[in-house]
Image: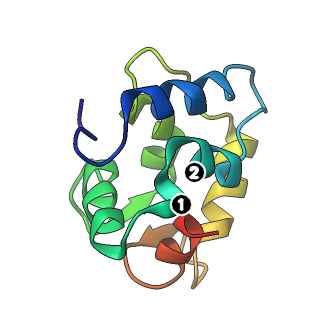
Amino acid sequence: MAFAGILSEADISAALKSTEAKESFNFKTFFAKSGLSSKSQAEVKKIFEILDQDKSGFIEEDELKLFLKNFRADARELTDSETKIFLSAGDSDGDGKIGVEGKYGRVFHI
């Protein structure tokens, strides 16, 4: 598991279970259930690096759509509306992507 040593498998399973139905993803709930919201800034940066599939230094909309699949390959993709809501929560400058610094870190600590 990519998040070994950072998140527990039981917490990830509980968080994913809460998102099985389309339009059920709420990043605040997911972060709380998975344990993401209690991680240090250093741990958040490690998680960000895993989510940044193309290693551009940003998480773009296409990467964010696959957010849940980073936790388990058989998880669903986020819907377009879920992706846009999630992106808007972390896009601090309106450029359509999330950077590791600034608002992204705050998104994890809501």
Q: Is residue 77 visible?
A: no
* Quadrant of res 25: top right
Q: For the N terminus, give its image quadrant.
A: top left
Q: Position of residue 43 (x, y in %)?
A: 30, 63
Say if mark 1 contacts mark 2, CB within 8 Å: yes
Asked if 110 appears above or below 14 in the picture, the reply is below
Which residue lies under the disc numbered 2?
A: 31
Q: Secondary structure at mark 1?
A: helix
106 or 54: nearer the viewer:
106
Q: Residue at x 68, y 34 (%)?
A: 79
Q: Amino acid at mark 2?
A: Phe
Q: For the C terminus, give its image quadrant.
A: bottom right
Q: Position of residue 80 (x, y in %)?
A: 69, 40
* Quadrant of res 41: bottom left
Neighbours of disc 1 within 10 Å: few (<14), some (14-19), many (20+) = many
Q: Which mark is first along the chain, 2 or 1?
A: 2
Q: Residue at x 65, y 51 (%)?
A: 27
Q: Residue at x 69, y 28 (%)?
A: 18
Q: Is residue 88 left or right of residue 43?
A: right
Neighbours of disc 2 within 10 Å: few (<14), some (14-19), many (20+) = many
Q: Position of residue 31 (x, y in %)?
A: 57, 51
Residue 5: mark: none
9 or 78: nearer the viewer:
9
Q: Is residue 53 left or right of residue 39?
A: left
Q: Is residue 75 visible?
A: yes
Q: Amino acid at mark 1?
A: Ser
Q: Residue at x 29, y 67 (%)?
A: 45
Q: Is residue 107 left or right of residue 55?
A: right
Which residue lies under the disc numbered 1?
A: 37
Q: Secondary structure at mark 2?
A: helix
